[in-house]
Image (cartoon, helix red, strand yellow):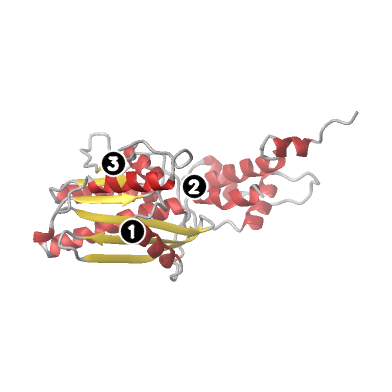
Amino acid sequence: MRSTPTAACEIHTNIEPLGLRRDAAVMNMVERYKRSDKSHPNRQLIDTWKPTGRLKQKSVMDIATYLQEKHHLPNNRENLQHFCKEVPPHHRKYIANIRTQLIEETSKKHRDPIDIMITAQKTLDTYPEHWIHVYTDGSAFKGTINGGYGVRVQYPDKTKEELSESCGSYCSNYEAEAFAIEVVVFQLTSVFSLYPEKTQNIVIFSDSKSVLEALQNESLQNSSLKSLFLTIDSFLKTYDVDLTLQWIPRHCNITGNERADTLAKKGSTAKQQNTTTSFRTAQQITTPRRNG
């Protein structure tokens, strides 16, 4: 009696094939070392390696070189930071109010879309009309390429402002979402500086719960999160206002959120700059190809 082929078992149990997992481990290891400090021994080992071609069995670096060419990984890498040097432990941090839940518990898997929309709208209605209401969104092709952000600002006097621009050739949805929030803070800094009478409390609605949770937990290894954290800190030091970051579910027919989504997609089609690529984005670039 023949046993079930390994490949069939992997498909049935939804386990990634061992060969692809090995390739991913090699790529992650080498990409991590290439982002280390230049004085790090592992970085020096990677930088000084040269292929010999004398052995039939390929080395780890031979495999890594092949995989990098196969997946077209960018060479403009962002260095890894295991902690935020700009925020020492004794530093008094000015942090936004972060809310990652609606006023009622909700789940897209178990609730009717209309119920989710109503709950989201109820959450929006809890914020006063005399506050500045902002909707932000980020977009990237295949989640990692040609990022763009979209922003819709609604002032208490009913005037509106819309912003849309690219974020970089290699930029994830996650980073584009963080960039959109940072752009808002910069924009409101300029507005409050030019028109002090417009200084008002702010609520920023974002559908990226992962970005809000990272800010809440002060997980700042990613440069986009670190930059956003420091920008908010500086803003709240300068202006005595309440700044709330409120999560709302995506695609639930909230007008401001849908408009921000459209603006983000528009931004992703604008001319892109060659920005540094984070380790997180480098990992994501290979994910669809490993999975299929």
Q: Quadrant of residue 104?
A: top left
Q: Position of residue 51 (x, y in %)?
A: 70, 52
Camera-side mark, 2 or 3: 3
Read off the residue under disc 1. Answer: 255
Q: Gap between marks 2 and 3, in whole Å?
A: 23 Å
Camera-side mark, 1 or 2: 1
Q: Position of residue 48 (x, y in %)?
A: 60, 50
In the image, what residue occupies the spot 61% across and 46% down? 27
**In the structure shown, which secondary structural element does the residue marked by tag 3 occupy?**
strand
Read off the residue under disc 2. Answer: 280
In the image, what residue occupies the spot 31% across and 56% down? 135
Give the amino acid at mark 3.
Answer: Ile
Q: Closer to the N terminus: mark 2 or mark 3?
A: 3
Read off the residue under disc 3. Answer: 98
Query: Marks 3 and 1: CB-CB under 8 Å?
Result: no
Q: Gap between marks 3 and 1, in whole Å?
A: 22 Å
- Does residue 231 appear in the picture of this structure? no
Query: Marks 2 and 3: CB-CB under 8 Å?
Result: no
Q: Position of residue 11 (x, y in %)?
A: 71, 39
Which residue extends farthest left? Answer: 197
Q: Is residue 1 above or below residue 95?
A: above
Quadrant of the snapshot with the N terminus: top right
In the image, what residue occupies the spot 47% across and 51% down? 278
Q: Closer to the N terminus: mark 1 or mark 2?
A: 1
Q: Closer to the N terminus: mark 3 or mark 1?
A: 3
Q: Gap between marks 1 and 2, in whole Å?
A: 31 Å
Q: For this view, does 70 lie left or right of residue 241?
A: right
Give the amino acid at mark 2.
Answer: Arg
